[in-house]
Image (cartoon, grey):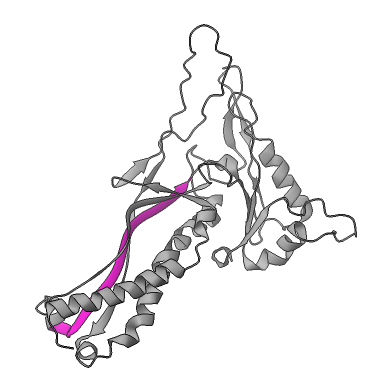
Amino acid sequence: MIINRQNLRDLFVGFNAAFTQGFRDAPQDWPKIATPVPSTTREEHYAWLGQFPRLREWVGERVVNAMASHDYRVVNQKFEATVEVARDDIEDDHYGVYKPLFQEMGYAAATHPNDIVFPLLAAGFTGICYDGQPFFDADHPVGLPGGSGGVVSVSNVQPGSGAPWFLLDVSRALKPIIFQKRREYDMRGVFDLNDEKVFMTDKFLYGVDARVAAGYGFWQQAFGSKDVLSAANYAAARQAMMAFKSDEGRPLGIKPTLLVCGPSNEGAALEILKAERNASGATNIYRGTAELLVTPWLD
């Protein structure tokens, strides 16, 4: 191939098509636990992460309820991956061997959110959420009804030292994790033979970059455990979540819908959610009570 700007642009079109194919065909697990939220600035301030008041019978004038305001911010981060294509390979028409590389780059871009969403979930035992407590914590403050100003401590965690597993309610508009997008994953390339990098190395650069971040949503939609994944502990997590109430004392209507674990807990999870009978031969009453997501990002 003759090296000129037009031919380099045509070559980029082919590389970008391979990138797009890899991006399109990549399986994505992160949308199952995270809600994509657009970002328009360096960071987003989620002051609204608090309790929305319940509806009341409208008698007389409206009663204005002050929403709890929280100083929870998620700062966007930049990510990139860059590869080189030798000028000699382009001149000698060997650029076809790079197609799998760009497909893999597309796969890496599509699955990159997994790299920040699932580790954030795993770090929830220490990572701080909107109320100033760890996302999974035994002391989440919840206001007492009646406007007394008092609070009680509510737990969404089981202590332990094993591989973590999580029970989530992903049925709401906002899932337990926020995936924030400031700039989408985009592939770019250098098309100028006189570019300084090309001049010095005789190689052309192609890369993908994005500005994204992940943060915590409502802790009430998640329960984290490092204890043994057993039917008893699973039942305790379900019961705790469904008992969560608002600051006004109303049930939040939490419905655990997704069990998330790493490969080391897959067998135990399948026993709880898929087996017709439990270890004693009795009917497994928890069969089908949640979907199962097994992900390598948790082990």
Compare residues 44 and 102 and report the one nearer the observer: 102
Q: Is residue 20 left or right of residue 248?
A: left
Look at the picture and state if 44 lies above or below 63. below
Compare residues 44 and 255 and report the one nearer the observer: 255
Q: Which residue is pictured at 68% across the width and 64% down the height?
A: 265
Residue ranking furthest to the right: 281
Quarter placement of the C terminus = bottom right
* Image position, residue 159 (x, y; %): 66, 51
Task: Specify whether residue 212 is painted magenta.
Answer: yes
Look at the picture and state if 183 lies above or below 4. above
Q: Main secondary structure of the magenta part?
A: strand
Look at the picture and state if 194 lies above or below 126. below
Q: Is residue 246 left or right of residue 24?
A: right
* Image position, residue 75 (x, y; %): 35, 48
Quarter placement of the N terminus = bottom left
Choose top left, top right, bottom left or bottom right for residue 193.
bottom left
* Image position, residue 202 (x, y; %): 17, 85
Q: Is residue 138 visible?
A: yes
Choose top left, top right, bottom left or bottom right for residue 95.
bottom left
Q: Which residue is pictured at 71% across the width and 60% down the height?
A: 269
Residue ranking furthest to the bottom: 92
Which range is magenta? 200-216
Task: Specify whether residue 99 is painted magenta.
Answer: no
Look at the picture and state if 222 lies above or below 4. above
Compare residues 124 and 242 and report the one nearer the observer: 242
Q: Is residue 164 visible?
A: no
